[in-house]
Amino acid sequence: MDNDSPTPRFLTRQEAAARLGVDLATVDRLVATGVLTRYRIGGRWVRVLTSEVAYLADMPRDWLRRC
């Protein structure tokens, strides 16, 4: 993989779960509660912003208990 490639703007729910170290149900809960913003791509596929996931990944892990 090329290190100069741009960071993707959107992640799948599965990719977000892997980056956050949580399961898919937790990502769905974060979307349902408004912590992560859901985007529909092509009317069907759900994506979340890479920047929002990166922000949560950099926070102390206790944020998860408050969601």
Image (cartoon, grey):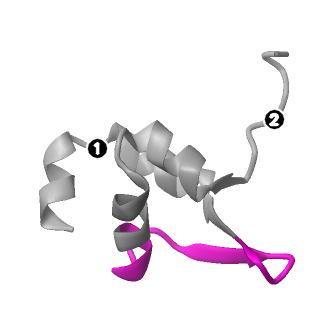
**Which residue shows up at 37% across the image and 63% down it?**
25
**Would residue 23 appear left or right of 6 to someone viewing this image?**
left
Residue wearing tag 2:
6
**13 to the left or right of 56:** right
Identify which residue, 25 or 31, lies in the foreground.
25
Q: Earlier in the sequence, mark 2 or mark 1?
A: 2
Whether residue 4 sits left or right of residue 58 in the image: it is: right
Q: Is residue 21 above or below residue 56?
A: above
**Residue 32 part of the magenta-drawn span:** yes
Q: Which residue is drawn at 86% across and 77% down?
A: 42
Q: Which amino acid does label 2 sit on?
A: Pro
The stretch in magenta equals: 30-45
Quadrant showing the N terminus:
top right
The residues tagged by marks 2 and 1 sit, at their Cα atoms, a distance apart of 23 Å
Disc number placed over residue 59 in the picture, else none? 1
Residue 59 figure quarter:
top left
- The type of residue carrying mark 1 is Met
Horizontal and vertical percent position of residue 33: 33, 80
Magenta-colored stretch includes residue 6: no
- Residue 45 location (% of width, % of height): 74, 71
Q: Is residue 14 above or below residue 19?
A: below
